[in-house]
Image (cartoon, grey):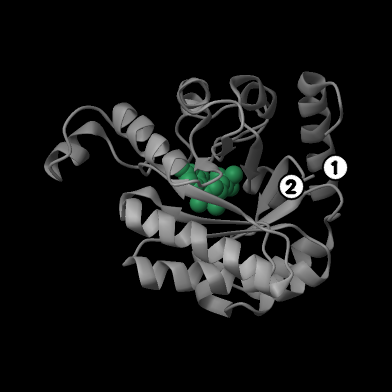
Amino acid sequence: MLPKVFVALDFADPMRALALADRLDPRRCGVKVGKELFVAAGPEPVRWLVARGFRVFLDLKFHDIPNTAAAACAAATRLGVAMLNVHAGGGRAMLAAAREAVDRTAGESGHARPLLLAVTVLTSLHDADLHEMGIPGTAAQQVVRLAQLTKACGLDGVVCSAHEAATLRAACGPHFRLVTPGIRPADAAPDDQARIVTPAAAIRLGADYLVIGRPITQAPDPLAALAAIDAAIAGVTGTGE
Ligand code: C5P
């Protein structure tokens, strides 16, 4: 079973990322490696984190022709990550190729099959941005449309705002995984996040996994910050998981 919280290791310096990970417990949380760390340091930090027992969410949001996106997904699967993602806007053929590549590669390499997620509409985009790109309707409608395409192509779920979670849960069913960033404990600074949700509220809204960065990585005691978040989540699930 995957941990509920994935800590975003948003550092360009791999030494800082790994030093922070060293203060975390792989039994209590997963970690997220995004473009900043991966482009700066390559796959080595991911291998190190996997070897330390961390479940890694490789957040590289692949978006390319089907063959290239599938090859990238296969390479990520060989790293032994627990989750990876693509852009749903890559379309049906790309999503299907990514799904096939992950399943085949996991089978061949003996790694557990990672969760394959899609990003629907970037939360930085507004309705007007979509209209400018020729996409009618609202961003909220486009999120549901792309989540349903994601599900139809057999992917495991989407990365979404907790504000979208209830709608997506209703549209995509109980088994579709919802991974939500934009989380802030009630007493934490919002930083640059605009529409934040507490960990307990996100779980209540239907999120399966939470991506949380600065409230943990910038805390004086990251483990204590994580423990407080876990306690808040356990208050909702009643399991401590
Ligand atoms: O530090 P913070 O908790 O804001 O980090 C959130 C993480 O989730 C960052 O890695 C950020 O890039 C990512 N993310 C987000 N909002 C989205 C998608 C991803 O904050 N809509």
For the residues bearing labels 1 and 2, Cβ distance under 8 angstroms: yes
Q: Nearer the viewer, residue 94 or 235?
A: 94
Give the crowd class for mark 1: few <14, some 14-19, many >=20 residues within 10 Å: few
Q: Nearer the viewer, residue 97 or 201?
A: 97
**Label 2 near ligand 1 (CB < 8 Å):** no
- Nearer to us of marks 1 and 2 is 1
Q: Amino acid at mark 2?
A: Ala
Helix, strand or loop at disc 1?
Answer: helix
Residue of label 2? 219
x%, y% of residue 34?
54, 61
11 with respect to 141 (left or right): right
Q: CA distance from mark 1 to mark 2?
A: 8 Å
x%, y% of residue 173?
54, 26
* Residue 206, placed above or below residue 48: above
Q: Is residue 40 visible?
A: yes
x%, y% of residue 177?
59, 37
Mark closest to the chain's N terminus, 1 or 2:
2
* Residue 77, placed above or below residue 159: below
Give the crowd class for mark 2: few <14, some 14-19, many >=20 residues within 10 Å: some
State the mark number for residue 224: 1
Q: Residue at x 53, y 24 (%)?
A: 169
Q: Is residue 11 visible?
A: no
Q: Residue at x 54, y 71 (%)?
A: 74
State the mark number for residue 78: none
Q: Nearer the viewer, residue 134 or 221?
A: 134
x%, y% of residue 37?
57, 69
Helix, strand or loop at disc 2?
Answer: loop
